[in-house]
Amino acid sequence: MREHYHEELDVVVGKLVSMTEIVASMMERATAALLGAELVQAESVIATDDDVDNLNREIETLATDIIALQQPVAGDLRTCIACLRMANTVERAGDLARHVAKTARMRYPEKAVPTELEPVFREMGQVATAMMTEVGSILAARDVSRVEALELADDRMDDLHRQLFRALLAEDWPHGIEAAVDVTLLSRFYERFADHCVSMARRTVYLVTGHRVDEVG
Amino acid sequence: MREHYHEELDVVVGKLVSMTEIVASMMERATAALLGAELVQAESVIATDDDVDNLNREIETLATDIIALQQPVAGDLRTCIACLRMANTVERAGDLARHVAKTARMRYPEKAVPTELEPVFREMGQVATAMMTEVGSILAARDVSRVEALELADDRMDDLHRQLFRALLAEDWPHGIEAAVDVTLLSRFYERFADHCVSMARRTVYLVTGHRVDEVG
């Protein structure tokens, strides 16, 4: 039997999916702002982060109210708690997209990323955006068969992260310390963003199956 | 009237306080390992992180069981949910202490931190350790009057973070790119650790008073 609070629970999951879509778009636009030194784009990403924070708070309120007022059964309670945690994780991913945009803004009208590293960051942006979009789809469809592909995408992100560190630590890094600091932090933002996607995917597995997959550190 | 599940709730809060104590000690030892290039100390911090992850899982299970089986009233439900989220936050702080220890291990037998920056990192380690210890005390005592002092400590951490960036970006940074990369990431680990402490303190305010204080980004 379908409990009467299921519609409210669907609203919570729907808002969480919306959060992933907004954050995926933030990361896409932040990467464009970074590579194109586009100030307006960067500002718009930074402004969007408030919407993400608001959605996180809405989800917290709604999920807590369902728990308090409807006393959901085991599986639904797991969904409520998983949504609370995942909303927090997407919010942090949004913070990372905001950090990318802030780096673009800080260096404007210069570009923060040296020209020859642009392709690496472009791919990082694509991988990050695709991963978060996929997390939203997995969550909406509760289709955990797609989690493995997401882990592979995370491996690709780790490769790109290592590639940047090799470039940084090569004997002939020609761009000076400021660019090295920017590349170090930016690379970490993308890599952490991907980790958050994996963490959400694993939590979705837990939500759907009740079996826990280890957290990513 | 005191509900019969309050003892179980006290166990959850107690485990959360234990987590803060372990993580405070991790950050203290990670800083010692970093500044002294002490491999055994670094390894021990890295190993301790598993205990933190286990405690996080225990708290999740216990808090979820209380919610599912005891149907706590509003304030207690808030406590359960706040504990779930705070356990997650301390776990992430533990990850940051582990990252510091890993940096120490990666550079062993060299030191990752240039000699003249050691005092800054020493103070960062002291501030971070004191902040996490204080979060545990605030939580144990539910004494939100001490949150303001914690915010001041966070301001100090931000000062130290900026001080390191000024050193990095000075014309005459003499330590090369590898040290710049290490200092950039280390500085961020400490700064984020402090942010997590503030976030926990604010969540404790919410837990005790029911009034939300804005999240730190």
Image: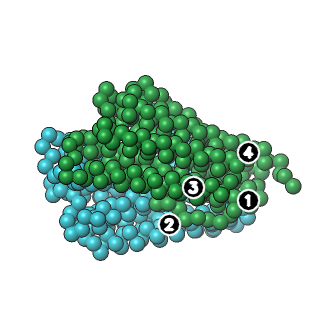
Chain colours: A green, B cyan
Q: Nearer the viewer, mark 3 or mark 2?
A: 3
In this picture, is B52 found above or below A11? below
Q: Residues within 10 Å of mark 3 (few under 14, many from 20)?
A: few
* Residue tagged 1: A75
Q: Residues within 10 Å of mark 2 (few under 14, many from 20)?
A: many
Disc 4 on helix, strand or loop?
A: helix
The answer for which chain carries disc 4 is: A
- In depth, the one of B92 and B137 nearer the eye is B92
Do marks 3 and 2 both belong to one polypeptide chain? no
Expressed as whole percent of the image width and height from the top left, the position of residue B177 reads 21, 50
* Residue tagged 4: A10
The answer for which chain carries disc 1 is: A
Do marks 1 and 4 both belong to one polypeptide chain? yes
Q: CA distance from mark 4 to mark 3?
A: 26 Å
* Residue tagged 2: B53
Disc 2 on helix, strand or loop?
A: helix
The answer for which chain carries disc 3 is: A
| Mark closest to the chain's N terminus, 1 or 4 | 4
Please state which amino acid type lies under the numbered disc 2.
Asp
Verify CB contact (< 8 Å) between mark 3 and mark 2: no
| Mark closest to the chain's N terminus, 4 or 3 | 4
Q: CA distance from mark 1 to mark 4?
A: 14 Å
* Residue tagged 3: A149
Please state which amino acid type lies under the numbered disc 1.
Gly
